[in-house]
């Protein structure tokens, strides 16, 4: 008997029911989210991270939370009714609202500018920190406008302090001056607390409208003391606890600082191990301090327990519990009740929820479409210019992405290309870009000094200054001088905008500029972005005798039969190979783009299972995997430091490296019949030139 056919209405309910369940789950979450908290958390509660709003694609789109898009979500605040407010920077300088029913809308702002007004008629420039008072008034650290803005419940935007000019001046609010303020908070008295980031001070806007400095001398540092005796270094986050203490994410110093009511500045008594550039900060009603850092972690310094990481571990994206969660450049934080924390996951263009795991039911999982990634296709639409004149090139390439760097035990990948030019050469922006991070340059005065604009990083430079250390471009760079007038620090302001061709630096004594494209730690190969007039007609070379075979335990296979290497079991293969591009000096050795191997039988026909080349190592991009370089390169690889005579790249071609992820592998000879074969190396550059000489190794497969 054929199966009974269900009535049409019943069939309809079968597919509608799951959708109803998901909708109710989401609604249940939002309803619960907006209710006053009534629970007491265990001190060691387990956090789980989920997507609250956004699809992970950079853009500007209001609507349902799962379909909304953010450009640079940096600051967050939560109102009494459970609505989440988001300061969105980048190309979308506006304040957004995630309503309790999960809808995203624009509260104020639109195009970039500096204008008061109602709702979308107002203009911001890189809004960063947010705070909200008991009356529902929102305060905005308008970083690019060097001002503090206010949004009333009816959507009216006004400027409460700052005249739009970068500087330092206390006094009446509209005559006061700030320098790129990033953080803002409101205390119980209604004072607005400001992290005046590039003035290295913490300021207050009193109820009478006057601005005064609470702490900080204006000199970057990490010094405790009373008021102006203390020093901060690029403070970016502020939060106020129930006792009136001000907690500061002192980003440049990597510390959490506290300002007591009497003005005494102290450093958090328990070091937060490994804290790297704390950015956002929030404090719960019971005094627990939580910070975000640029390693992608949310760290809690509880009032009565040792510090611990609530969520995150390394940069990336993943919903999950504790260290399984991943964030990318998390910024602003806001408590939404005990065990509920809103996170501006800026690098992933998302707003996230970090909450006590048992309180998340029945929230559905994020859509599989949420997969933040660098927009390589969009970046590729325009040819990549050279960072030095002539912009159309060509210049000598002295290093490529994926080359081995670092000493034994500290191996790493080279994260871009090196362009060989002389010290003092002007370095220019290769693309239009906006500075997103409050700390976008570092390693001042060292050979590894760098700066980052949009998705492009320039290394081995003197940022914002000439070869003689003469600062230029004070509107976008922040120079710091010592008492003797010597330049001792250079910073690049969050929100600074650059146009292709703008001068950003000069080449330092390393005599080349390094260019990286993509997210830090997840760079893409710049040569894949149509670098203008880059030519490589030279095929790679494999060193004579440079293909070596090892057994599974790493022992060199030296036994020969009739001139053939005898192999059995699982085999590892290492090849010594390098490339050159047009215009390279004779001694230059560059890394390859694509490697692999093929096994051939008699007459050169492919052996069973090897109809095509096995492409195993592909240097199109990197990923945040510190162990990957040790799986790609054998010991002895790298550039000629520590007395080595020449650059060597010893590729383990039986391992795999694709999309930045490395894994161990072998050539399993047991899958072949015993007999004679040729093991052939595939070694190609990015233009498709393939090494021919020294690529073949005659072998004899035997069964044990």
Image (tube, rainbow, N blue to C red):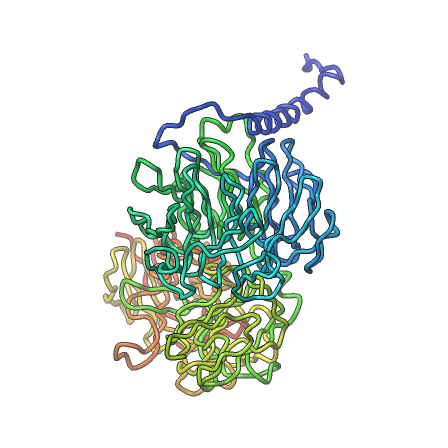
Residue sitting at 35 percent across and 31 percent down? 43
Q: Give x and y (percent) for residue 200.
A: 44, 61
Is residue 170 toward the left or the right of residue 379 in the image? left
Q: Give x and y (percent) for residue 212.
A: 49, 56
Instruction: Give the position of the N terminus as an image quadrant.
Output: top right
Number of numbered callouts drawn: 0
Is residue 135 toward the left or the right of residue 585 in the image? right
**Rendering quarter of residue 590:** bottom left
Q: Give x and y (percent) for residue 178.
A: 54, 61
Q: Nearer the viewer, residue 514 or 621?
A: 514
Q: Is residue 667 visible?
A: no
**Rendering quarter of residue 428:** bottom right
Residue 647 vs 518, above or below: the answer is below
Q: Is residue 323 visible?
A: yes
Q: Nearer the viewer, residue 536 or 699?
A: 536
**Rendering quarter of residue 367:** top right
Residue 662 vs 357, above or below: the answer is below
Q: Give x and y (percent) for residue 100.
A: 63, 32
Q: Nearer the viewer, residue 206 or 26?
A: 206
């Amino acid at each position: 008997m054929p199966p009974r056919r269900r009535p049409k209405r019943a069939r309809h309910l079968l597919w509608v029911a799951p959708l109803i369940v998901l909708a109710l789950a989401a609604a249940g979450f939002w309803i619960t989210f907006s209710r006053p908290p009534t629970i007491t958390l265990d001190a060691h509660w387990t956090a789980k991270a989920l997507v609250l709003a956004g699809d992970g694609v950079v853009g500007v789109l209001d609507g349902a939370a799962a379909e909304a898009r953010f450009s640079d979500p940096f600051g967050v605040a939560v109102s009494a009714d459970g609505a989440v407010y988001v300061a969105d920077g980048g190309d979308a300088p506006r304040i957004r609202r995630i309503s309790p029913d999960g809808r995203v809308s624009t509260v104020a702002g639109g195009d970039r500018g500096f204008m008061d007004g109602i709702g979308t008629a107002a203009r911001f420039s890189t809004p960063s920190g947010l705070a909200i008072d008991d009356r529902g008034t929102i305060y905005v650290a308008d970083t690019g406008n060097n001002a503090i803005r206010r949004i009333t419940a009816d959507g009216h935007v006004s400027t409460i302090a700052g005249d739009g000019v970068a500087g330092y001046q206390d006094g009446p609010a509209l005559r006061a001056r700030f320098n790129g303020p990033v953080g803002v908070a409101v205390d119980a008295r209604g004072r607005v607390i400001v992290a005046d980031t590039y003035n290295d001070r913490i300021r207050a806007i009193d109820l009478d409208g006057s601005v005064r400095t609470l702490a900080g001398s204006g000199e970057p540092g990490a010094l405790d003391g009373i008021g102006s005796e203390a020093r901060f270094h690029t403070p970016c986050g502020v939060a106020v606890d129930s006792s009136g203490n001000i907690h500061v994410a002192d980003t440049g110093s990597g510390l959490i600082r506290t300002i007591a009511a009497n003005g005494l500045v102290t450093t958090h008594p328990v070091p937060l191990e490994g804290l790297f550039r704390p950015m956002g900060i929030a404090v719960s009603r019971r005094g627990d301090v939580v910070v975000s850092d640029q390693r992608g972690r949310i760290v809690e310094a509880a009032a009565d327990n040792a510090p611990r990481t609530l969520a995150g571990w390394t940069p990336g994206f993943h919903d999950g519990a504790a260290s399984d969660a991943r964030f990318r450049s998390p910024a602003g934080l806001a408590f939404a009740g005990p065990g509920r924390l809103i996170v501006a996951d800026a690098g992933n263009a998302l707003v996230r929820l970090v909450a006590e795991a048992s309180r998340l039911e029945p929230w559905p999982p994020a859509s599989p479409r949420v997969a933040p990634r660098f927009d390589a296709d969009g970046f590729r639409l325009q040819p990549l210019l050279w960072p030095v004149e002539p912009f159309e090139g060509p210049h000598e390439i002295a290093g490529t992405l994926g080359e081995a760097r670092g000493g034994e035990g500290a191996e790493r990948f080279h994260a871009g290309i090196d362009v060989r030019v002389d010290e003092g050469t002007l370095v220019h922006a290769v693309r239009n870009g906006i500075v997103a991070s409050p700390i976008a340059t570092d390693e001042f005065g060292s050979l590894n000094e760098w700066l980052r604009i949009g998705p492009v990083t320039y290394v081995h430079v003197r940022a914002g200054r000439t070869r003689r250390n003469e600062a230029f471009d004070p509107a976008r760079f922040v120079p710091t001088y010592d008492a003797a007038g010597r330049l001792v620090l250079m910073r690049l302001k969050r929100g600074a905008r650059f146009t292709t061709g703008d001068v950003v630096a000069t080449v330092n004594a390393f005599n080349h500029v390094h260019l990286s494209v993509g997210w830090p730690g997840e760079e893409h190969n710049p040569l894949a972005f149509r670098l203008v007039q880059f030519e490589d007609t030279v095929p790679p070379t494999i060193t004579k005798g440079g293909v070596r075979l090892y057994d599974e335990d790493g022992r060199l296979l030296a036994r020969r039969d009739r001139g053939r290497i005898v192999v059995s079991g699982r085999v590892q293969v290492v090849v010594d190979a390098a490339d050159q591009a047009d215009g390279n000096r004779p001694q230059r050795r560059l890394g390859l783009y694509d490697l692999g191997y093929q096994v051939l039988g008699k007459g050169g026909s492919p052996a069973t299972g090897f109809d095509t080349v096995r492409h195993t190592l592909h240097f199109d991009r990197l990923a945040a995997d510190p162990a990957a370089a040790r799986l790609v390169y054998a010991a002895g690889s790298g550039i000629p430091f520590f007395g080595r005579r020449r650059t060597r790249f010893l590729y383990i071609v039986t391992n795999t490296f694709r999309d930045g992820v490395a894994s161990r592998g072998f050539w399993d000879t047991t899958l072949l019949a015993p007999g004679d074969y040729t093991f052939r190396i595939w070694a190609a550059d990015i233009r498709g030139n393939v090494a021919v000489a020294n690529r073949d190794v005659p072998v004899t497969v035997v069964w044990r």
